[in-house]
Amino acid sequence: MANRNRRANAPDVDNTIDLVQVDGLVVAKIIKHCHEEGSSAVDVAQGVLLGLVADTRLEVTNCFPFPKNLDENFDEEDYQMEMMRHLRKVNVDHLHVGWYQSTQQGAFLSTQFLESQFTYQTSIEESVVLIYDPLKTKRGFLHLKAYRLTPQAVALYKDNDFGADAIKTHHLSFESLYQEIRLVIHNSHLVNALLCELSEMVPSYEGSQYLDLGTASVLEKHLRSLTDNVDELLQDTNKFNIYQRQVVKQQQEKQKYIQKRNLENTARQARGEAPLPDEDITKVFKPIPVPPRLEPMVLSAQIAAHCQQVSLFCSQALGKLFLSEALQQPQSSQQTVLKGSSKTA
Amino acid sequence: MSRFFGTASDSDTESDVSEEEVQQRPTAVPTYTFSDDEEEQKRIVRSAKEKRFEELKDIIKLIKNYKKNKDLSKMLSSFEELTKAYQKALPVIAKEEKGVTPRFYIQCLVEVETFLNELWEDRDGRKNLSKNNSKSLSTLRQKMRKYVKDFEADVAKFKENPDEEEEDEEAEEKSEAESDEESEAEGPAAFRKSESETRTKPLPKVKPIAPEGDDSDDSYWDSDGEDETSSSDDDSKYANLKEKFLKVAGGDDDKKKEKKDRKDKEKAQRRKDREEEEELEMEGGDGWQVQGKATQAKPKMFAKDADINTGVVLKKLFEILAARGKKGTDRREQVEMLHELYTVSEANNLGIGIAVKVKFTIISAIFDYNPKICDAMKPEHWEKLLQCIAELLDLLNSRTDIIMGEHVSEDHEKLDQAEYDAEQDPSRRFFSVRGCMLTTVERMDEEFVKILKECDAHSNEYVERLKDETRVSAIIDSLQTYIERQSLPSELCRLYMRKIEHMYYKFDPNTIKQNNGESNVEKDTTLAVMDRLCRYIYVNDKEERIRPRAMLCHIYHYALHDEWYKARDLMLMSHLQETVHLLDPSTQILYNRTMVQLGLCAFRHGHIKEAHHALLDIQSSGRAKELLAQGLLLQRQHERTSEQEKIEKQRQMPFHMHINLELLECVYLVSAMLIEIPYMAAHESDARRRMISKSFHHQLKVSERQAVTGPPESMREHVVAASKAMRNGLWKQAHNFIINEKMNAKVWDLFYQADRVRTMLVRKIQEESLRTYLFTHSSVYDSLSMATLSKMFDLEQPTVHAIISKMVMNEELMASLDEPTQSVVMHRTEPSRLQSMSLQLADKLANLVDNNERILKIRQGPFGFSRGNQNVRFGDRPQYGNRQGQQGGGGNWQRRGGDNRDNRDNHRDNRDRHNN
């Protein structure tokens, strides 16, 4: 069930890791944890990935969850170190290679997310983040993806300056904020054999979720989060707009001021007096702080991701609808549903 | 020691019964506290008169000195002081000396006058005087002349016979100076003082005295060989001890005699006999004897043979009053004394004037008993107070010729029966007494509220106290008859307000019966009374405080009796909503109470919206308890200071006036449900939907958060469950949730005509469920039969028709009515949820694109782009230099080019997104 959905890498992408190979055990553990803790809308389940780097391939061989602890005294780092020490004792790979997180409808992107991935990538170069969507999996599509920040994004974070100019100099746009890494699920032969055996035992009606036609609710959810994101983006653009206007206004004033100064100076020269000292013009006109552009960029990336997901979902749903239409041809009573979904597609 | 024996014996040789009697009475305690006597002798207890006189005498002494030194300027100032002091002393003189100027004063005046005249005559001498002195002399002489004119008669009298009087006066002075005892003996105030002192000292104080006696008089004890070493302070023990003393002391003749005297005195005094005076005289100048008597005597009122007339009683009264408010004054004692004075004056038939005066003083003394204003009175005092006030009012009402009021000044009081009888002119035949009955009753009312608040509201005690409410009301009523006779509008307004405040929260079932024509119309209902009183206040109230209160009470009363329209109109006319925040807190509380009552009334009448509006303010804050002053809320943010807490406690309503908070909340939630549920159904997909009732939503959310919802328990859960059922159009379920046994017991049975309210409620639930159903499910139907609908919701077809028509009219429902088939035909114009969301998204995206365009416009504008960029760089320059090292202008150019390109990229991106 490897996810084959891949993106063409941008030309200037680093090649430290180009494939993530995840053990079946890890996938099972992540799924278990996320379904237990991350299935409600508010909570997010997170955990640590353990594994090894082999050439440009990252093998994730084990993982453990972060405990949900509201206790303030709880030291997460201590816990992690402890865990890793214990795992080492039982001869499990104990190298920290990243983390995983559950998500709702793919809405995982945020500044915090990027920040934590940045810290991971700066301390452990090869680290990746696995994103798992329990809702989609429930509907029959295993949704597990690996992401890394692009080198530009890392550089931007290193500078810690998110103004428009800085983003420009790093040639960064919302598309090149992060990259998806190909993910392969790997199982040992023994497990494969067991799976083969199990697949025979699964009753035939299981796995029919593929044909789930509940299009409207999924689309609605996506639309809702899209609307929210667009709203926020709108606010950000508004802020930027205001900033621009202020800058222009200040610029005009500055121009006037300089002109006046020049006139005065020439007049003084004509009278044979010393010109006025050059005052620091920045003191007279304090530069207006540039609103950070990271937030809108993240929002744009999130919107783009949503759009991608919607289009993907719609293409699948359309296929299913055509299929079901063919099945129901004699009755042909599914008109309304078709109409609704085709509109959004 | 001797004193010790004396008292011990006298309390003992009496019969045992009387002895015990004395002991039981708290005032008898002083019998044992002899050691205080010495201390008391040192104490100078001065009456007002003495104080003033001393002051005068001091000044006179000074003047005499100056006279000797011929220091006229100082004499002038002293003389001025003297006149002032005399002015101050005047009331005392008028009271105690019956207006006769004291002789020493006159003497001084005469002396000074003659001295001045001599000086004046002596021209040579005058010339020798210093400038200052001569000036003073002339002014002093002029002043003197003027001043002496006032005392002409006295002066003449004095000049006639100066020597004799001088002697007389000297004697008087001497006596006054030498012995406090005498003055104390005549001054009951002093008596009481010493007594109170002894009384306030707790009994155990006696204990150390006995051993002291032991030490000093060992021989006695030894010879007797008693077991008095046990220092028990038991009363009986003491009685024993005294017997021992008595035995030993018995040998001493003198003492015995004294004892006898004292015993007699005691007896006499206990019987209110007035022989004491004589006995006192017989005893002669035996100083300590008198003193001892002072300590143990119960306040004796008057000498036996004293002629008890108005003047004497009044004097006594003033004496008692003079001690009022002083430290160490025993307040209970004062009350008792006044009571006694009252009985005395009654016994001597001094007339109603005195009776009223004394009664009034008793009442204020009872008020005084409690020194702290925030504490409630003790029940026994309260009983006494009620009784006194009722009696006083009876007195006042029984006669028409008593004038009592604040306007009567103390000097113009007419209390004397004789004077009254002597008055020929019938129009001037009246008693006038100073004092305000209204204020007294108001104070009593406040005390009543305090007492109620003090009790635990769920105890029998509260019920007991609440029974006094009728008595309080009766007092107010009788005061009303009294004041109506005098008819002062401002006082009447105040009184009516009191009456209204006792009435407005009481429900009178007769009113509603009368409205329904069930009972006879002639009977005066509280509503009618209320109406009359309030109208009087509206017309006559000059202060702005009473009128709004009366209005609010009026509205409250209307609302309480289901007079919804009258109550509402009055509320709207009053315009109190706009000004209520400027009024005092207690009126604001009343306003809140009134609004709540109004809301409840609206609900009973089925005006759901109005009920919701009226209750919204109180209920939405979640502080209903505090707003209605029915209990203090715990505040987490900031602690109250104890001061604040006290104030807030004072504002609290007594329990019997509380409005049931659960009823209030239930009514609010149910009305919110009836409004909100259809509204929610109608605006499900509307992004800009606003909440009508926040607290209702809060309740809904709370129940949604629960993982498992069991059957409803509390009132809130019932309402929430009903709302959920209603949302699905299940009116029967909703009905069962709202109206069942539990809810009946908790809420609905509290209404006066509960069944009417219930039928109204069911009806509303049916209607609103129908509306909700149509809102939520109209998209599923092409057409709907009205007959089906009326069956589904158990409503008559015309009602269904009406509701649907209204919805169509208001454009809430896209449908039309098909008359021939009696059905509703839907028009499909509403977009589906997904569609409407897509539309919203499209709207927002359009906005976003607009904004982006605007950003670009500024950047690319003929003026903006290059300038804008320069500007940014200008500010950045120092940084830039640091980062890029030595790059010159060329780098700048390059960068600008880069910017340019980026911008274009940006623009392209934007386009792409737009196209998406």
Image (tube, grey):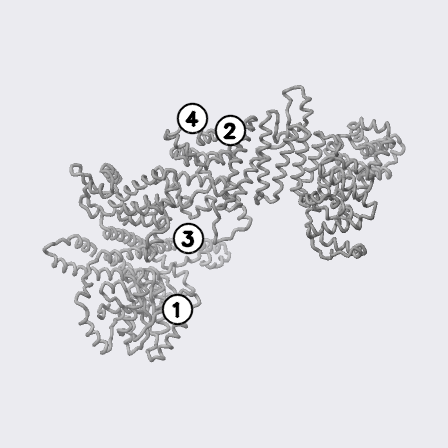
Contact, mark 4 vs mark 2 (Cβ under 8 Å): no
**Tag in front: 4 or 2:** 4
- Identity of the amino acid at label 1? Gln
The residue lying at 30 percent from left, 41 percent from top is: B764
Asked if residue B33 lies left or right of residue B360, the reply is: right
Disc assigned to residue B884: 1
Residue A342, relative to residue B7: is it above or below?
A: below
Q: Chain of mark 3?
A: A
Answer few, some or many: residues within 10 Å of disc 3's Cα (few below 14, many 20 plus, some between 14 and 19).
few
The answer to whether residue A147 is visible is no
- Looking at the image, residue A131 sits to the left or right of residue A256; the answer is left
Which mark, by number, is residue B540? 2
Q: Residue B691, how many percent across, how many down? A: 34, 47
To which quarter of the image does residue A169 belong? Answer: bottom left
* Disc 4 element: loop
Residue at the spot of label 4: B522
In the image, residue A70 above or below residue B256: below
